[in-house]
Image (tube, rainbow, N blue to C red):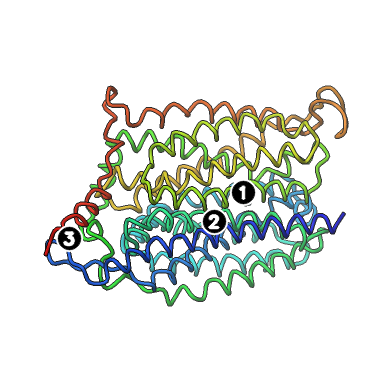
Amino acid sequence: MDGSRNLQNSTSKNSAVHGLVTAVDSVSRTDDVALEERNSPQGSSGQEYRVYRRRFFGLTQLILLNIIVSWDWLTFSALSTTSAEYFDVSETAINWLSTGFLFAFVIVSPVVIWTLNRGPKEAIIVSSILILIGNWIRYAGARATGGHFGVVMFGQILIGFAQPFVLSAPTRYSDLWFSDKGRISATAVVSLSNPFGGALAQLIDPLWASKASDIPNMILWVSIMSSIACIPSFFVPAAPPTPPSASSTVPKISLQKSFHLLLHSPFFWLGFAPFSIYVGFFNSISSLINQILGPYGYSEDEAGICGAVLILVGLVAAAVISPLTDRTKAYLLTIKILIPILALSYLAFIWMPQTRTIAGPYVVAAVLGASSFALVPIVLEFLVEVTFPASPEVGSTVFWAGGQLLGGIFIIIMGALKDETATGGDTVHHGDRPKNNMYRALVFEAVLCLAVVPLPLLMGIDKLGLGGAKESRRLGLDRQADQQRSVDP
């Protein structure tokens, strides 16, 4: 049994690593074409455009930090029962380690926008410092006699403050360092490394903490890895010597004007609502997966693997779809195809725990993860296109903040909707819904996900005055510069 589980874990991790490597390789290949094309050519104004291989150092560091910060977030989610036993608290209290982490994102968002506006390197350094301090505070709290839950919570919140500095950075970093031929792939590989860290937490943490007394050692290993991952941050280059494309030379409008542009853009609001709700529910289902499946007889290991499947299959799907979208620039079409699939996946997941078989939850989780992850980088880059020349970090941070805020709220609501009475039976192996099931919470989830499907489908409809969603403002500027160079002697 253990050998089979380890084989599953190994296969899942290998698939995820392959997906990330494929995505990174795609970024390299697509944008290195630009490197060869733009080593010396100049635009009509005499401006030279170049991309540099050193951009991958900063990209890799953003990947590492996003992996670590997400691992920190879900350290306890797949071990909610074991963690509650060690700290002598309820599972609801353990849920607050995830909820507080998500709310911390919202609190620090204004500082994140200001910092990223100055440059991604400063944001990377701030995040690294907070990750270092937060991890060792968590370890100190866990190692103390009996475990001090309040100290662990304080460390968790500090790490929550660290997350937005790197999670909101991809669009800003790709705009600064990458040409139009590699931006989506660059944004994708960084954005999706965040849930990859969550998948590692779901898979590995249960192996490190098979009993309550193992919790401090598990946190120690995570703290050591976090410390190692943070060190390179101080050596990331701040900005390229030469801009990578014509759009990069256009001065971004001020933060105040960027906010004004976003708030008056119908495309911002049509994208903000579904993005926030889908990210919020993804966060909540990742945090509560053990409590969703546990009442039906699934083990913590099986719940952890389901959470990992949700993420790992998504990474592979994004590794395929993001480079294709980078080439075709079919942002809106891709969004309109994937949104209904995602909503229907949440609908189907309502009945999966009741099957009491591994196949049902795993298959639906795979489809849910694939559609979710493929959407994230495309939506973020689409937002930059339709709100150009607003500074990229503004829209990105606001979108992520909405998702994290709703994620925290949804965790609280779904926990409150837990049914403490059995329906049709009173054991985990019989009856439609056993004691402590989360059937009502999953219905709540599906209803909201289906309700926002029409919003992004409205974009691009000329009769509604939303035809502007088909325009690529930043991309159009880059294409115009390329065409100008091709006709210049």
- Residue at position x 67%, y 48% in the image: 309
Could you say which disc has been placed on residue 313 in the image? Answer: 1
Q: Please rate how many residues cluster around mark 3, counting C-alpha atoms within 10 Å: few if below 14, some from 14 to 19, many from 20.
A: some
Q: Nearer the viewer, residue 47 or 398?
A: 47
Give x and y (percent) for residue 129.
Answer: 50, 69
- Residue at position x 50%, y 25% in the image: 451
Q: Amino acid at mark 2?
A: Asn
Q: CA distance from mark 1 to mark 2?
A: 14 Å
Ranked by sequence position, the earlier of labels 3 and 2 is 2
Q: CA distance from mark 3 to mark 2?
A: 38 Å
Q: Is residue 374 above or below residue 175?
A: above
Q: CA distance from mark 1 to mark 3?
A: 41 Å
Residue underneath mark 2: 194
- The nearer-to-camera label among 1 and 3 is 3
Residue underneath mark 3: 485
- Residue at position x 19%, y 56% in the image: 481
- Residue at position x 27%, y 52% in the image: 255
Q: Amino acid at mark 1?
A: Val
Among the 4 quarters of the image, the one containing residue 248: bottom left
Among the 4 quarters of the image, the one containing residue 370: top right
Q: Are marks 1 and 3 in contact (CB under 8 Å)?
A: no
- The nearer-to-camera label among 1 and 2 is 1
Q: Amino acid at mark 3?
A: Arg
In the rendered image, the quadrant that contains the N terminus is: bottom right
